[in-house]
Amino acid sequence: MFSKAMLNLFLEGAAETFYMVLVSTFVAYLIGLPLGVLLVVSDKDGIRPMKVLNRVLGVVINLLRSAPFLILLVALTPVTKAIVGTSLGSTATIVPLVIGSAPFIARMVESSIKEVDGGVIEAAQSMGASPLQIVLRVMLPEAKPSLTVGAAIAITTILGYSAMAGFVGGGGLGTIAVNYGLYRYQSDVMLVTLAMLVLIVQVFQEVGMHIAARIDKRRR
């Protein structure tokens, strides 16, 4: 049995993990969603082709996506310190989480919007809708179920990133697993933190899939 202090530590770690994941996901979507839309709109087959912009965005997003998160976490230490004032703790970890996950979200959004039936977009264009109207009233609403599933996947990915941040004092359950489970050889602590992370992943996945099924018009 764990002591009361250890149980409190688990609860505090879970709360920090939720804080990091939810805030990081929200901010990353503020960046990744418009980037994903811009990738679709500026594509050669998009509603407003812009070859140079699309290519530059694609290169930058691919470069950031290809960087392993742990390396990115360390490389962004000066940026994190400049923004937050420290590179340790849950709040500091949000900075690399956002930078590391925003490109991934942009690609997820791009993929979701490209699933929208081209005939619907062509119909909107024939009715004189502007590109902004097509994005807001056709593309995003039609892609909503896929975007919701993508959000659930993004949250679980960011959760995995937050656990990795435990190796550099990032806070949350990852830090507990590293400091107690790894460095102090307490396998029971490692197993409990692992079980809690798996449970959180399952909760986010089930909620995301349930919401996606509820709003998917094709299943009605």
Image (cartoon, rainbow, N blue to C red):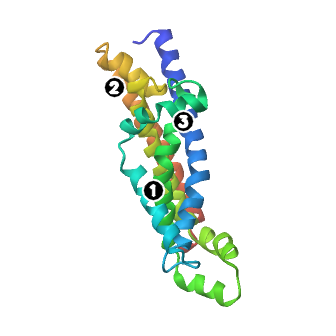
Point out the tag, 3 or 1, that comes first from the N-terminus: 1
Residue 213: where, in percent of width, then height?
53, 62
Residue 209 seen in this snapshot:
no
Q: Of the residues under marks 1 and 2, which one precedes in the sequence?
A: 1
N-terminal label among 3 and 2: 3
| Secondary element at image label 2 | helix
SS under mark 1: helix
Q: Are marks 1 and 2 in contact (CB under 8 Å)?
A: no
- The tag on residue 60 is 1
Residue located 41% across and 25% down the image: 168
Task: State the residue in front, 82 or 126.
Answer: 82
Q: Is residue 15 left or right of residue 156?
A: right
183 displayed left or right of 144: left
Q: Are marks 3 and 1 in contact (CB under 8 Å)?
A: no
Q: Classify residue 196 by image quadrant.
A: top left
Front-most of 88 and 121?
88
Task: Report the residue marked by disc 2.
Answer: 191
Q: Residue furthest front?
A: 52
Depth check, mark 3 against mark 1: the one in front is 1
Helix or strand or loop: what does disc 3 sit on? helix
User: Looking at numbered disc 3 in the image, what kind of residue is underneath it?
Assistant: Ile
Q: Residue at x 31, y 12 (%)?
A: 184
How many neighbours does mark 2 have within 10 angstroms: few (below 14), some (14-19), or many (20 or more)?
few
Q: Which mark is residue 94?
A: 3
- The span from disc 1 to disc 2 (Cα, nearest Å) is 38 Å
**Viewport quadrant of the C terminus:** bottom right
Name the amino acid, label 1: Val
Percent from the top left, x then y, of residue 131?
A: 66, 76
Question: Residue 168 or 7: which is nearer the viewer?
Answer: 168
What's the residue type where badge 2 is placed?
Answer: Leu
